[in-house]
Image (spheres, coloured by chain):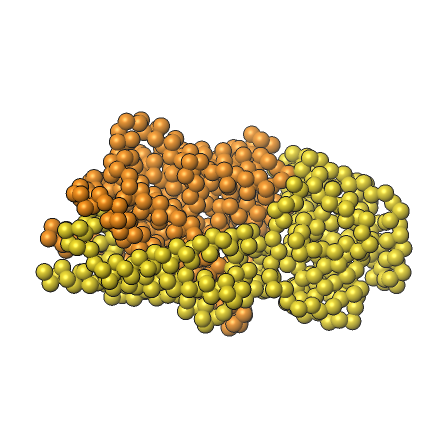
Chain colours: A orange, B yellow
């Protein structure tokens, strides 16, 4: 009875006026993109174009799905098997800068790419990880890990400092972001999260004997996996759909041509491209390598660092956890901080 | 009690829908594998991940069915306040508009794949992504650690370059080759090319290399001794890069290359490219590259046709860059490749 009380009362106690907006915003975005595609493509009536579109769309989903499932399974296991106050206790014991630093390097311990990141980050915050450290980890883990280092080094065989630069720039960027977020959170917690109350209190799993049995725990975990899978897949599918529309209609040379002569434009253009293309952090270095003859290394670094931290696909998934204004703020911060550190790094190296 | 049972049944419906989707994905992956469509979506090295996803989706889906059919006993239920967020989303889900759009989104990959079946990326997409004719640019630019702004022999509008990319001796070789190619076009191609080939064979080529390009120099030495250099499926990218890197030395050699025909407005009359898409992970990061060719046969090529061209390699100017130009004297149609994409050779250089 207690359980049913919680279920029926809770939503009434915290009405969420935000929810209806989301599904309306997303189709609108899709519609705008579609109009853009039709405007840009003279061959829009061509079935070949739309067959290419579904291929790219399903391809992105197939590629993201293993990592999303991995993230969800990890998050559900953390949910059930790790003590509710694990990170909260850690956050009390550790000084905040040390925690942010640890989160920045967390990708080495737990490399998760951006597709599987959101469920894990949300779970970590529910276990009491401070938002500053969580956001730091969210931005850091898709870049600061050995797999991405190796693939970047392979993509730029003649410029090994490119891979080093990607790591170094990402490291300083996430530290800056973590620091700024910790200031914001210090002022107001509600700025960041959609349901801040669900992170504040300690979650109380029933402590009785039946719950502690493994089958019940697994059932609980599977329950969570199903819910989180649905919730995240809706956003992932939307993101993949819009990304695929861009993939089939956006001439890459537009950005390269437009950004000649002006370094600031070049940075901005390449970061926009990284955002729209939503490439995997392990394969975007090869795309960047194909631009080397046309663009400056500093802006390529911006492309490589910005893309995994923020892209179309992940922005949509972030909306299940973070408020829109925070996502916007994060995007603006990254747009400023990433080119800054990339330029500093290049001027040191070359 | 009423509210309780209705919430329970809506939760059951959710679980069944979730199971339906998970099983749908697993069926779709099985179908893709059975129909051998997997190469259209992901690179072979990622295939096992996608197949694993099918398995995980299946298990998770069956679990959802089980949980929907056999409800948890009330006192054993997995009630904890950790689900508040999911409960709220479910409420939003129950809201007819938002749940409808979410459901359509989740079904979108299946519906669209049915309406527009998948197909390999074609020259339409290649035009958007930009075919690379000089992939070695990424190697050349930074080998000597020279400055930030890469340019191709001062051809791009960037003005802040510090050093020319090509050595003076090389550039004279280019002019020579270009002259030769021009004479080839006007005069008898076969005779000129055989002379050229003879000259090339007697001249001892030196493949200058540094630590980064050594592997390409080694491949160049192997390729150089061949009567006809065949661009193979396995090392498609590597061979083209090597030919491009040492195009002065390879000028005059006979090359055979299969691929699809690509044409655009920037090309001079009679020119086309024989190209392939190279894929890292999925179609989103597939990028096209190939060899610019000039058709000296009676065969009329049309876009997206699969051909195998053979001819003599020369150097020519294309969009202000010096690129390889294959003077195709033998051209035959070939059936479209089962696997339309090429992949980086992971054993290369080891």
In the displayed structure, B339 sits above or below B169; it is below
Q: State the residue at coordinates (73%, 45%).
A: B219
Image spot of residue B271 (x, y percent): 73, 63
> Which image quarter: residue A75?
top left
Image spot of residue B77 (x, y percent): 18, 52
> Which image quarter: residue A78?
top left
**Front-most of residues B76 and A338:** B76
In this picture, residue B319 sits left or right of residue B26: right
> Which image quarter: residue A156?
top right
Image spot of residue B29 (x, y percent): 45, 62
Q: State the residue at coordinates (79%, 56%).
A: B228
In this picture, residue A291 sits left or right of residue A62: right
Image spot of residue B349 (x, y percent): 67, 42
In the displayed structure, B60 sits above or below B120; it is above
Q: State the residue at coordinates (70%, 41%).
A: B215
In this picture, residue A10 sits left or right of residue B26: left
Regarding residue B113, the answer to whether it shows in the image is yes
């Amino acid at each position: 009875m207690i359980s049913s009380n919680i279920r029926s009362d809770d939503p009434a106690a915290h009405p969420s006026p935000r929810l209806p907006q989301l599904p309306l915003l997303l189709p609108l975005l899709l519609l705008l993109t579609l109009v853009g595609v039709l405007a840009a493509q003279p061959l829009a009536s061509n079935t070949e174009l739309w067959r290419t579109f579904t291929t790219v769309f399903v391809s992105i989903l197939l590629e993201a799905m293993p990592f999303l499932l991995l993230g969800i399974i990890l998050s559900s296991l953390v949910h059930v098997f790790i003590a509710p106050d694990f990170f909260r206790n850690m956050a009390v014991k550790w000084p905040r800068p040390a925690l942010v630093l640890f989160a920045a390097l967390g990708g080495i311990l737990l490399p998760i790419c951006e597709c599987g990141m959101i469920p894990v980050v949300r779970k970590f915050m529910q276990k009491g990880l401070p938002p500053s450290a969580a956001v730091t980890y969210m931005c850091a883990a898709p870049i600061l890990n050995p797999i991405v280092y190796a693939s970047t080094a392979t993509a730029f065989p003649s410029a090994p400092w490119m891979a080093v630069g990607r790591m170094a720039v990402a490291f300083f960027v996430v530290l800056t972001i973590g620091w700024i977020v910790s200031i914001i959170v210090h002022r107001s917690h509600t700025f960041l999260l959609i349901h801040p109350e669900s992170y504040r209190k300690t979650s109380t799993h029933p402590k009785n004997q039946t719950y502690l049995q493994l089958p019940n725990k697994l059932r609980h975990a599977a329950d969570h996996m199903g819910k989180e899978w649905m919730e995240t897949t809706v956003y992932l599918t939307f993101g993949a759909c819009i990304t695929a529309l861009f993939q089939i209609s956006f001439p890459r040379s537009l950005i390269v041509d437009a950004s000649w002569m002006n370094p600031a434009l070049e940075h901005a253009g390449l970061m926009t491209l990284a955002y729209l293309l939503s490439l995997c952090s392990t394969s975007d270095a090869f795309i960047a390598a194909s631009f080397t003859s046309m663009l400056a290394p500093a802006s390529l670094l911006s492309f490589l660092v910005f893309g995994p931290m923020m892209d179309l696909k992940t922005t949509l998934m972030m909306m299940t956890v973070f408020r829109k204004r925070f996502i916007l703020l994060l995007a603006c911060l990254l747009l400023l901080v990433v080119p800054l550190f990339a330029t500093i790094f290049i001027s040191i190296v070359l | 009690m009423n509210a309780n049972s209705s919430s329970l049944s809506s939760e059951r419906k959710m679980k069944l829908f979730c199971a339906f989707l998970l099983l749908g994905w697993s069926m779709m992956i099985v179908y893709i594998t059975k129909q051998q469509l997997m190469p259209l979506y992901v690179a072979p090295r990622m295939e096992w991940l996608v197949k694993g996803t099918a398995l995980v989706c299946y298990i998770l889906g069956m679990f959802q069915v089980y949980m929907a059919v056999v409800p948890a006993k009330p006192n054993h239920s997995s009630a904890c306040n950790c689900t508040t967020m999911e409960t709220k989303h479910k409420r939003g889900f129950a809201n007819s508009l938002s749940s409808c759009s979410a459901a359509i989104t989740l079904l979108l990959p299946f519906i669209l794949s049915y309406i527009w079946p998948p197909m390999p990326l074609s020259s339409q997409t290649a035009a958007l992504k930009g075919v690379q004719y000089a992939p070695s640019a990424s190697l050349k630019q930074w080998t000597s650690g020279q400055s930030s702004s890469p340019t191709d022999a001062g051809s791009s509008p960037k003005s802040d370059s510090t050093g020319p990319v090509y050595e003076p001796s090389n550039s004279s070789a280019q002019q020579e080759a270009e002259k030769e190619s021009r004479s080839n076009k006007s005069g008898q191609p076969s005779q000129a090319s055989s002379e050229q080939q003879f000259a090339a064979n007697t001249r001892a080529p030196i493949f200058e290399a540094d630590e980064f390009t050594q592997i390409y120099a080694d491949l160049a030495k192997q390729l150089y001794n061949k009567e006809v250099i065949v661009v193979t499926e396995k090392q498609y990218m590597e061979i083209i890069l090597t030919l491009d890197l040492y195009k002065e030395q390879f000028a005059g050699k006979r090359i055979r290359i299969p691929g699809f025909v690509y044409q655009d407005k920037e090309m001079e009359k009679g020119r086309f490219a024989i190209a392939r898409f190279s894929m890292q992970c999925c179609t989103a990061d597939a990028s096209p590259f190939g060899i610019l060719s000039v058709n000296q046969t009676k065969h009329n090529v049309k876009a997206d046709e699969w051909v195998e061209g053979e001819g003599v390699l020369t150097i020519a100017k294309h969009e202000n860059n010096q690129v390889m130009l294959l003077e195709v004297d033998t051209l035959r149609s070939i059936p479209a490749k089962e696997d339309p994409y090429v992949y980086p050779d992971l054993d290369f250089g080891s």
